[in-house]
Image: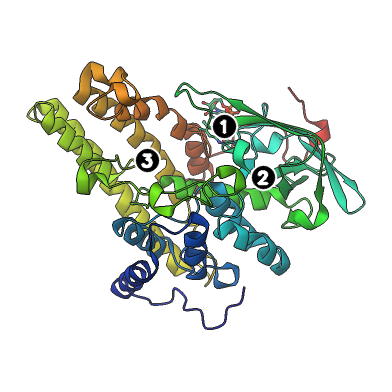
Amino acid sequence: MTDTATPTAADIDSATLRAEVEAFCDDNWDPDLPVEQWWRLLAEARYSHPMLPPSAGGLGYGQSQAALVSLVLAERGVLGPPGGLGRMLAAPTIAAHGTPEQIERLIPEILEGRVGWCQLFSEPNAGSDLASLQCRAERDGDEWVITGQKVWTSGGQVADKGMLLARTDPDLPKHAGISWFAFDMDQPGVEVRPLTEMTGRALFNEVFIDEARVADSALIGGLNNGWRVGNTTLMVERASLGSSGRKPPEAIPGPMGGAQQKRAGDFVRPSAASSGGGVPPVGIDMWWWLVDLARKNGGIGGKVLREELMRLYAMIEINRLSIQRARAAGRARSAAGAGDYASAAAPNIAKLAMSEMHRSFRDIGMQVVGADGMLSGESDAQTGGHICEVALFSPAPSIYGGTDQVQRNIIGERVLGLPKEPGPPRETPFSQLPKN
Ligand SMILES: Cc1cc2nc3c(=O)[nH]c(=O)nc-3n(C[C@H](O)[C@H](O)[C@H](O)COP(=O)(O)OP(=O)(O)OC[C@H]3O[C@@H](n4cnc5c(N)ncnc54)[C@H](O)[C@@H]3O)c2cc1C
């Protein structure tokens, strides 16, 4: 990937950007295209992940410009770029910490949806305290031998690669002896076992790793630098999870995702706004969907319901404006190229707000549909079980990507300067720390 003549973020104004993306869709979208071909077109136009620097297949856009690209793709009714954690997390992490060779080797296949990724961070005894992870990597020539257990691995059952955090030196302090690997999932010694949630589906998995292998050339960001690299992944995750803008529909990338050869148009459903058909994700469009539902169900005349709806509206708007303010501040601070993810506590605050919004949508939705909220799928004629889905899913956002409590700790310690939680001295070697 070269930078030659690629237009970058610099001063492209919203009207020009909107016109460019609209023209791209008008010229290229054909619902009969196979998904893989449409994804290739998006990647060639650099709309697959426009926040990546030009050297990594993006346009160096800030979050607000990238959000506008997403909005226009959604408005044009086209399939969005590859879904999943590869594009969302692995690509920005590799772009920030990988060598040019690693960027060239690993990022294009993500942007074109040729591989799916999962995130192999959490372990049974290392979730909030991620730096306590025990999965170990031992050097063997120009390879590493990996042994350990991961858990809550979203999409692990359809992933070709994993963002693996493993301990490469137990004699260093716990934050210092960790490395970040681009790990092949399809190999002997890797067993993925789906975990069924209360939604009835298995979003995440347990992953057992027994002497599996990863090449030294797949070590991203340098030996024992995994805490720093992993924090880039987490910061991008929090920023992405906290943003509630309108997005186009997505399909799962990679051979196991099963979408590549299918017709792109089959993944695009009519929007709620245009047809009353699909239900938008949590955010302002869903708020309007809920207001319409309340009107159909006897109106929004009740004072309590009206107040709660307005409280939720205010929360969505405040979150939108806070993100916009943080982006502007981030743009002013950020060096050109790498995007503006790391603007103080903004991602943590946005992620907290998103957890709260899910809970509010659950509670107000249940008030609106009453006992029908217990119905799932087709049995609920009103919403196709959507309120039930929101309710069953609502605990998840306050846990994944770091729990609400952990977000508050980070804001307290790193932003407000409050004292840290007591614990062993930070420089204690991991091997000497008490373990569960
Ligand atoms: C839907 C979903 C998808 C996920 N996907 C992935 C994935 O793809 N890859 C991956 O690696 N992980 C994934 N996770 C795991 C997620 O990151 C962890 O569940 C999360 O970090 C919490 O860790 P834990 O479950 O071990 O809980 P624990 O860390 O054991 O926490 C238990 C409780 O104690 C609280 N607590 C812990 N420490 C503190 C503290 N210091 N101060 C105050 N309160 C504290 C927590 O807030 C929580 O309420 C996913 C989780 C969910 C729910």
Which of 184 and 217 lies nearest the eye of the viewer? 184
Ligand 1 within 8 Å of the CB at mark 1: yes
Q: Residue furthest front?
A: 32
- Judge the density around disc 2: few (<14), some (14-19), many (≥20) Cα neighbours within 10 Å: many
Question: What residue appears at the point 40 percent right and 68 percent down from the top-left corner?
Answer: 28
**Is 35 positioned to the left or the right of 117 in the image?**
left
Q: Earlier in the sequence, mark 2 or mark 3?
A: 2
Camera-near label (3 vs 1) is 1
- The residue at which mark 2 appears reads as 162
- The residue at which mark 3 appears reads as 353
Question: What SS does tag 1 mark?
Answer: strand
Question: What SS does tag 2 mark?
Answer: strand
Q: Earlier in the sequence, mark 3 or mark 1?
A: 1
Question: What residue appears at the point 44 percent right and 24 percent down from the top-left corner?
Answer: 199
The kind of residue tagged 3 is Ala
The kind of residue tagged 2 is Gly
